[in-house]
Amino acid sequence: MNYASMAVQRGRSAVLADKSWLVIARGFSRYLVGNETYEANNLYGRYLQYGHVAIEPADYSLRAFSHDGWNWSRYPGTTAIQLPNDQLIATLHQLPGAGIEEMLLSTETYSGATTLGDESSLFAVKLHGHAKYQQQSFRARKSCFIFANRIIALGSAIDNRDTEHHTETTLFQHKVPAGEVVEVNGEAINSIGTHLSLQGETRFKDPAGNRYFIPAGQQVRFSYDNQASNHEDDGTPTQGLFATAVNRSR
């Protein structure tokens, strides 16, 4: 794992070890690959490093990720063009002197992270979609400031001229297999089939206890529903129940 374009911040609870956490923010550039995809690995991982901000709890039962039903266009923190899996799946070729694989680079050189002491980190990246998949019109600038247990995530200059697919920034995508509750503006929600469009100041609390604040004027969409997807290694169908919040740019 290359740490040159990654911010890693640990939070330790002096009282309860299971309340500790790890935040990882990462990107890619002309010099650091954005994904590693092989014939039987990571087939839908194109957006893995598009400003991914992963919050990992010490109690792994509260982890957001699950292979079953995961929307591969919605890694938390990423800004990306939303595609169905049949368009997101990697097109693989035999590389000279290598195997059948894909490792995409960006045209942008700017992606990096730094830390200050034990409680502050900064991550920033310029994103540009790849010509291999005709996504050159997509661009975004993203930054992430981590201060103790607070994250300030910013995005600007987000552009996508693909008129058939929306651009979204994913706030969270969290598995809820047992009907775990999500708070939306103070209201507890765990009803399957819930879909909300929110434009005022919005607050969420995910099943792991992480809180999110989005200022007014954004196009925030929340869903609590079943999702159908494909396994990242062989494309077999999967399904699962997820709570998801996104900010739609277009």
Image (cartoon, rainbow, N blue to C red):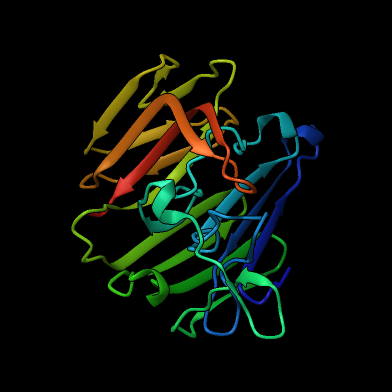
Residue at 65% in and 85% down? 96
Residue 85 position in % (x across, y down): 44, 47
Q: Is residue 242 above or below residue 136?
A: above
Q: On the picture, is 58 further left or further right than 51?
A: right
Residue 234 position in % (x across, y down): 62, 46
Tally the numbered discs: 0
Residue at 26% in and 54% down? 249
Camera-side residue: 140 or 15?
140
Q: Is residue 160 above or below residue 236?
A: below
Residue at 75% in and 33% down? 59
Q: Quadrant of the C terminus?
A: bottom left
Instruction: Name the quadrant containing residue 195.
Output: top left
Q: Is residue 153 above or below residue 92?
A: above
Residue at 65% in and 59% down? 39
Residue 51 position in % (x across, y down): 49, 62
Q: Quadrant of the N terminus?
A: bottom right
